Amino acid sequence: MRILIAFLLLLSVPAPLWASQTLWQDVAPDVKMRLVASNSVTPEGTTWIGLEIEMPDDTKTYWRVPGESGIPAKFDFARSQGLTGHTVAWPMPMRETDKGYIDHVYYGHTVLPLELDIDADEVLIDVDIVLGICSDVCVPVAAQFTQHLDFAQPDRANGLRIDQARALVPVQWNGQNDLFGAASFDAQARTIMVAVEPAGYDMGSVIAHVANSMALFGPPELDETNGVLIFPLLGNGKTAPRDGDRLHLTFLTGNGAYEVVSVLDF
């Protein structure tokens, strides 16, 4: 009888203690989320997990700079053990204009990869997550996940799932041509101007993002006379960039998504 009771108690545990994924959590109508883990350690001393979001094809969530109507994502790992930091590796988003608002979004099934800095053989993830989910209405949704990582048992299936999501993340441009030149911000015109060499990428796909800022810039306009891409700053300008800020330009090519980082001049 004691064995039976113990077995039933084990079945009642919300998630396996040493699993490579958590149970799904319903966070909105027809939307659920879970964490998946590779359970492997990189040579740099990090490990990869993924936030898997199951949504209908007409439902969306948002990029690191969500946009005019989007809701920014928040990841709080403060209660975790064996972690010293985390980085969200954001896949290339879609820029869309809906009801006059410009946002950066992901539709349908989405996996957000996260790289965790670890300093222990045993790691406990205890994370609070807030995301914006938008279908007919846009709402913030919250989930809390607890998961032990077992590095003695790597999960190849989840590792592949995370790797497929990482393949959509822009990588540093290392082509032979310098696609972008000097970048500057014109405070009076409220625009970023970037010198360009038109070749090998979709200019309309370029997203300008200032590091550690929620400043939103509109789609680029090409000034052919001066050979520059112009990105207008949207909103009231309270989050305008400052001299020396790092400018990230993400863009699409026939070989995938890339990123170029430069320093803004004023």
Image (cartoon, rainbow, N blue to C red):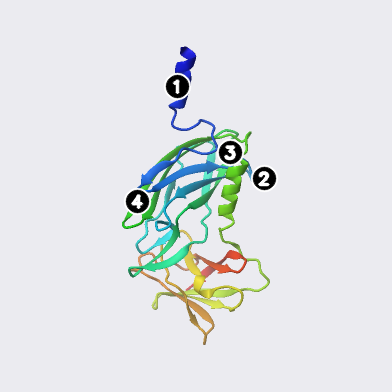
Depicted 177 relative to depicted 106: above or below:
below
User: Mark 1 near mark 2, Cβ–Cβ under 8 Å?
Assistant: no
Q: Decide which of tag 1 and tag 3 comes sooner along the chain.
A: 1
User: Mark 4 near mark 2, Cβ–Cβ under 8 Å?
Assistant: no
- Mark identifier at residue 204: none
User: Mark 3 near mark 2, Cβ–Cβ under 8 Å?
Assistant: no
Of 215 and 4, nearer the camera is: 4
- Dot 1 alpha-carbon crowd within 10 angstroms: few under 14, some 14 to 19, many 20 or more: few
State the residue position of label 1: 8
State the residue position of label 2: 43
Of 3 and 85, nearer the camera is: 3
Kindly identify the amino acid type of the residue bearing the numbered disc 1. Answer: Leu
User: Mark 4 near mark 3, Cβ–Cβ under 8 Å?
Assistant: no
Q: Decide which of tag 3 and tag 2 comes sooner along the chain.
A: 2
Q: Is residue 241 visible?
A: no
Rendering coords of residue 228 (x, y %): 52, 80
Q: Decide which of tag 4 and tag 2 comes sooner along the chain.
A: 2
State the residue position of label 3: 119
Which type of secondary structure does the marked residue at label 2 adopt? loop
Which of label 1 and label 2 is nearer to you?
Answer: 1
Cα–Cα gap, marks 4 and 2:
36 Å
- Dot 3 alpha-carbon crowd within 10 angstroms: few under 14, some 14 to 19, many 20 or more: some
